[in-house]
Amino acid sequence: MKRLASIILAVVAAVLLAMATASAGSICENAPCEDAINVRAEENFTIELQSNAGSTGFEWWTQFEPEYLSLMDAFEQSDKGKPGMVGVPGKKHFVFSAKKAGSTQIIMLSLQPWENSTVGTKKIFPLNIS
C-alpha cells in the first residue's frame, strides 16, 4: 500500500512539475509563490517548513528538476515539548545543492499519502542559480 501511495505521489508530482514548466512565463503568474531563493552553483541551501507529521500524518514531499538540484538531506526537528509528549510540532528541513546556473522552482506538497494523496498545503519556491 505504501508503495502504491509513493507511485501515485510521484505521478502527481511529475504532473505538477510538467504543468509548471510547460506554462509560458513564471510559475508564479499562475499560483502564489514564496520568496525567491538566490544561490550560486555548487552552493547548499535549506528550506525549513512547519511540520507535525507525528500527529497529523501530513508529510512534506518535494518535486524539483534534478538537472539543477540535488536533495542532500531531509530531517525533522521537533520543537521542545514536555518529556514524553508525542505529536509535538516541529520543522522539516530540506537541504539542497545547486548544480548549475539557471532558473527553476521547488514545489513542496504537504499531504497524507494514504488518503489518496490529498494535498493539504502547496508551496512553490522560485529558485535563481548564478
Image (cartoon, rainbow, N blue to C red):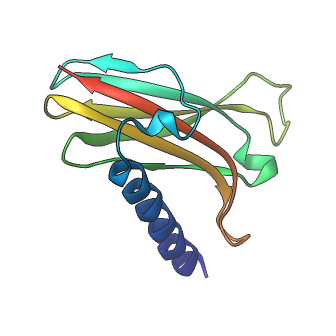
Q: In x, y percent, where is residue 116?
A: 69, 72
Note whether 51 is above or below 34 in the view shown.
below
Q: Indicate left or right for 79 with 77 as reference.
A: right
Q: What x and y, as percent, mark residue 106? A: 41, 39
Q: Residue 74, position in %: x, y?
A: 45, 40
- Residue occupying image coordinates x 74% and y 40%: 52
Q: Could you tell me how many numbered marks the image carries?
A: 0
Quadrant (top left, top right, bottom left, bottom right) of the C terminus: top left
Q: What quarter of the picture does the N terminus occupy? A: bottom right
Q: Residue at x 19, y 18 (%)?
A: 40
Please provide percent x and percent y for residue 96. 33, 34
Q: Is residue 52 left or right of residue 12?
A: right
Task: From the viewer's side, name the closer residue of 44 and 27.
Answer: 27
The quarter holding residue 77 reads: top right
- Residue at 74% of width from left, 48% of height from top? 54
51 sits to left or right of 61: right
Task: Determine whether 11 is above or below 73 in the image.
Answer: below
Taking depth in this image into account, of 15 and 96 the one nearest to the observer is 15
Q: Nearer the viewer, residue 48 or 109?
A: 109
Using the image, determine if residue 14 lies above or below residue 8.
Answer: above
Residue reaching furthest to the front: 24
Query: Residue 105 lies in what quarter of the image?
Result: top left
Front in this rendered view, residue 79 or 57: 57
Q: Residue at x 83, y 29 (%)?
A: 83
